[in-house]
Image: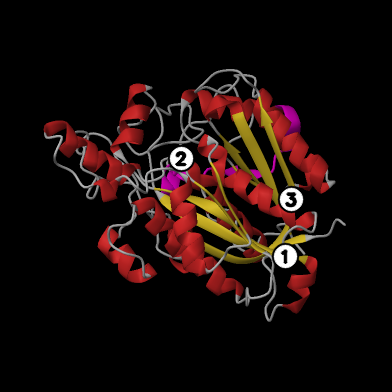
Amino acid sequence: MNSGVFVAGTGVVSAIGNNVAEHLLALEHGNAGMGNMTLLDSVHRSSLPVAEVKLSNKELAKRTGLATGITRTALLSALAAQEAVNDAAIDLKNLRTGFISANSVGGMDKTENFYAQFLADTSAGRLRNVVNHECGRPTEIVADLLGISHFVTTISTACSSSANAVFLGARMIRHNLLDVAVAGGADALTKFTLNGFNSLMILDNEFCKPFDENRKGLNLGEGAGYIVLVSEKIARQLPKDVYCAISGWANANDAYHQTASSPAGTGSLLAMNGALHKAGIQPSAISYINLHGTGTQNNDIAEGTAINTLFAPHFPKLSSTKSFTGHTLGACGGVEAVFSALSVRHGLVYPNLRFHTQMKELPFAPQTVFLKNQQISHVMSNSFGFGGNCSSLIFSKV
């Protein structure tokens, strides 16, 4: 019943690009996406940098064919998912195809606008702005756009959401429940998330410095990332080579705190160990780790401690690409799954921007230079969320 699962297509949009090609250029040249808010209307506009996608809702609607009134999360999701499906070049007709998408804010951007108007005047505000509020609506909208109806579901587990979407897609293919799964996630910047994270005092008022001794917090970002997963049978029929295999995945929960990770990295360690076990490889086989690496005091020490426990004394190259994209919340696992697949296919290791001082608690430091033509056998991608929900994925060369 079990068989291999392969990545046949990739699609991504974030603050550093509107497609895969633009992301590769930005990653190579060290072009980060953080800056002042230009689209989000917030009282923190001049004090908290964010990583906004450089397209308005009107521009996103034009590119995707969706209506301009659709929520920004759905628009971002559509752009990246369409690219992934087009890249895979698969005729989805007569195939058991799933769309497994993740997010954490749903249509909150439209709801915020309605709420402000409604508070001022209970007869004001357009109800059409709240009908797409729940997290499942962006998934349904984009599934309809792609013509996928066999299996459609939404994952919302905070910052591990889209990693878990990939996890579920891989499992369903492995167990012969789907032939193809378009899996990943999307999230738009909203005042709800900005103010929420600011209340936790974990936002940096400068560009974030993941895994640096002097890190002060994260920068919020937005975007979407999807990969097209296929069975071994479908992979053999494709007119192009697959990117890689997805060989390992695991989810764990340390149940430590609502918004903090265990300082000992318990959940992180369980997730990484579980993914290695699923892939049937030892820690020494990992060539590169795409860190969760948010830049907060708690996350980086928890993840770093777990990595030290698992990999010491020989550490693979590692970095946080959130130093480019900001923390895209429910989208980050999908965005970084795309980066991981590209790393395997092209032999790439990405830099950890703005790293200057090694953390005193850790015996390793992140990669600071973009590397090409590397011998990449296995890439581990970590996504760790609030509530202790921790997931790790492993992408492998074929």
Instruction: Tell me the number on the disc at residue 104.
Output: 2
Amino acid at circle 3: Arg
Give above or below for 231 relative to 364.
below
Alpha carbon separation for disc pair 2 and 3: 22 Å
Camera-side residue of 342 and 161: 161
Q: CA distance from mark 1 to mark 2?
A: 27 Å
Which image quarter: residue 177? bottom right
In the image, what residue occupies the spot 33% across and 22% down?
A: 199
In x, y percent, where is residue 239? Answer: 68, 81
Magenta region: which residues? 309-328
Q: Which of the pair 307/60 is nearer the observer?
A: 60
Q: Is residue 371 left or right of residue 311?
A: left
From what the image shows, is residue 167 above or below residue 10? above
| Mark identifier at residue 179 | 1
Q: Is residue 1 left or right of residue 255?
A: right
Crowding at dot 1, Cα within 10 Å, few <14 / some 14-19 / many 20+, comes out as: many
Residue 295: give x, y in percent of width and height: 46, 33
Provide the secondary structure element on which disc 3 rests: helix
Identify the secondary structure beneath mark 1. loop
Q: Secondary structure at mark 2?
A: loop
Q: Amino acid at mark 2?
A: Ser
Residue 115 in the figure: left or right of residue 307: left
The residue where tag 3 is placed is 171
Residue 76 is covered by the magenta coloring: no
- What residue sits 16% from the left and 39% below the top? 117
Mark toward the start of the polypeptide (1 vs 3): 3
Q: Which of disc 3 and disc 2 is earlier in sequence?
A: 2
Residue furthest to the bottom in view is 239
Q: Locate the C terminus by quadrant.
A: bottom right
Circle 1: residue type: Asp
Q: Is residue 23 visible?
A: no
